[in-house]
């Protein structure tokens, strides 16, 4: 029997959506005010869902304390109160769109959570705008 357990977390971060190979006019046309040069911030909400078999000894799919610690070390510590463009190495060459942030988080989580589990990351950039990624 496969069951999904989820952990919710949050972080605050600034970013700017732009391409350095485009001029300001094209960046503004494509990314709107998200391309303004002085950055802007979001209160990101994150849900990491882990699907797997229930361990017959513990009754857990995964110990949620372990999942909490992985999210803290892989997401909250490196992203919280940071400028994603300037402070987070994964975005040195990658535009920090919600989609790209979600994939980066998934990749970091995938390295820490065993292959016997399926994982899905859902990232809320605003209460109404969110993306999900499960490795496909």
Image (spheres, rainbow, N blue to C red):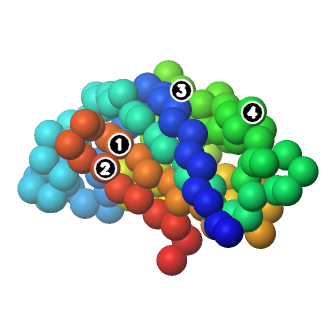
Q: Look at the numbered disc 4 and give the secondary structure of its residue.
A: helix
Res 130 label: 2
Q: Which is nearer the N-term, disc 1 or disc 3?
A: 3
In the rendered image, the residue lying farthest to the bottom is 136
Q: Which is nearer the N-term, disc 2 or disc 1?
A: 1
On screen, residue 37 versus residue 29, left or right, reads right
| Residue displayed at 31% across by 50% down | 130
Q: Which is nearer the N-term, disc 2 or disc 3?
A: 3
Instruction: Measure the C-alpha gap from mark 4 to mark 1.
Output: 22 Å
Residue 125: tell me if it is visible.
yes
Res 113 label: none
State the image coordinates of residue 13 (x, y, percent, origin top left). 43, 29
| Residue displayed at 67% across by 53% down | 109
On screen, residue 114 versus residue 130, left or right, reads right
Instruction: Measure the C-alpha gap from mark 1 to mark 3.
Output: 14 Å
In the rendered structure, are the residues bearing label 2 and label 1 in contact, judged by CB atoms less than 8 Å apart? yes
On screen, residue 79 versus residue 60, left or right, reads left
State the image coordinates of residue 104 (x, y, percent, origin top left). 55, 55
In the rendered image, the residue lying farthest to the right is 57
Instruction: Measure the C-alpha gap from mark 3 to mark 4.
Output: 20 Å
In the rendered structure, are the residues bearing label 4 and label 2 in contact, judged by CB atoms less than 8 Å apart? no
Residue under pointer 4:
65
State the image coordinates of residue 129 (x, y, percent, origin top left). 24, 47
Q: Which circle, 4 or 1, is nearer the viewer?
A: 4
Residue 27 against residue 8 in the figure, above or below:
below
Residue under pointer 1:
124
Q: Quadrant of residue 73?
A: top right
Q: Which is nearer the N-term, disc 4 or disc 1?
A: 4
């Amino acid at each position: 029997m496969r069951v999904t357990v989820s952990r919710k977390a949050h972080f605050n971060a600034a970013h700017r959506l732009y391409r350095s190979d485009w001029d300001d006019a094209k960046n503004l046309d494509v990314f709107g005010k998200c391309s303004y040069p002085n950055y802007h911030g979001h209160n990101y909400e994150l849900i990491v869902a882990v699907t797997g078999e229930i361990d017959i000894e513990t009754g857990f799919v995964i110990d949620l304390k372990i999942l909490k610690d992985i999210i803290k070390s892989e997401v909250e510590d490196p992203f919280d109160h940071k400028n994603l463009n300037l402070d987070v190495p994964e975005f040195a060459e990658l535009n920090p769109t919600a989609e790209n942030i979600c994939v980066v988080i998934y990749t970091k989580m995938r390295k820490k959570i065993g292959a016997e589990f399926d994982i899905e990351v859902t990232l809320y950039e605003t209460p109404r705008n969110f993306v999900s990624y499960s490795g496909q």
